[in-house]
Each structure stands twice: as C-alpha cells, then as structure tokens.
Image (cartoon, grey):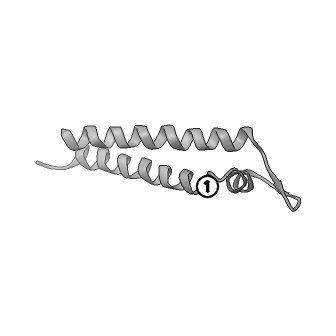
Amino acid sequence: MKKFIFGIILSGIGFIYSFACFVYAVLNPWTIDGQSGLIVSFRGNDVLIPFLISTLILIIGILICGYEAYRQK
C-alpha cells in the first residue's frame, strides 16, 4: 500500500509539473529562423528538459501504481 501511495504522489507531481511546462510553452510562443511549433516553443522557453523529466516521472509513477494494483500476493 505504501508503494501505491508513493506511485500516486509521483504521478501527481509529474503531471502538475509537466502540465505547467506545457502551459508555459503554449502561452509563450517562439519563432526561431522562421520555424514555429510546440517543440520550438519548448526549446525557446527552456522547458524542454524539465518537461521530459517530469513526463518520465509521471510514467514511472503510473507504472508503480499499475504494478502494485495488479501484482499477485
């Protein structure tokens, strides 16, 4: 049960932080050398690496929750 709660906490933190990075990148668009888009906006706002790390944390939290929910005792 403790690992399941830990997975929920990790998922929550990862979701909140990745959502914040996504919203920040969308609300502050960039155009570099005539290119625009979401990835360019992530790179221009310097939130690409934090977004990828927080998304990885979100996935790890979901995997922990799934493992704990469906494991056989």
> Does 26 sit left or right of 71 as displayed?
right
Q: In the depicted view, which residue is nearer to us: 54 or 45?
A: 45
Q: In the depicted view, which residue is nearer to us: 58 or 41?
A: 41
> Does 2 sit left or right of 47 as displayed?
left
Q: In which quarter of the image is the N terminus?
A: top left
> Does 4 sit left or right of 27 as displayed?
left
Query: Which quarter of the picture shows residue 32?
Result: bottom right
Q: In the depicted view, which residue is nearer to us: 68 or 2?
A: 2
- Residue picked out by circle 1: 48
Q: How many numbered marks does the figure carry?
A: 1
Q: Position of residue 46 (x, y in %)?
A: 65, 53
Furthest residue toward left:
73
Q: Is residue 38 above or below residue 26?
A: below
Q: Which residue: 22% across, 44% down? A: 3
Q: Which residue: 48% across, 40% down? A: 15
Q: Which residue: 26% across, 50% down? A: 67
Q: Where is residue 60 in the image (x, y as percent from the top left)?
A: 37, 52
Furthest residue toward bottom:
33
Q: In the depicted view, which residue is nearer to us: 32 or 61?
A: 32
Query: Which quarter of the picture shows residue 7?
Result: top left
> Does 55 sit left or right of 73 as displayed?
right
Furthest residue toward right:
34
Q: Which residue: 49% across, 55% down? A: 53
Q: Badge 1: how crowded within 10 Å, few (<14), some, or many (20+)?
A: many
Q: Where is residue 31 in the image (x, y as percent from the top left)?
A: 83, 53
Q: Position of residue 28 (x, y in %)?
A: 75, 41
Q: What residue type is labelled 1?
A: Leu
SS type, badge 1? helix
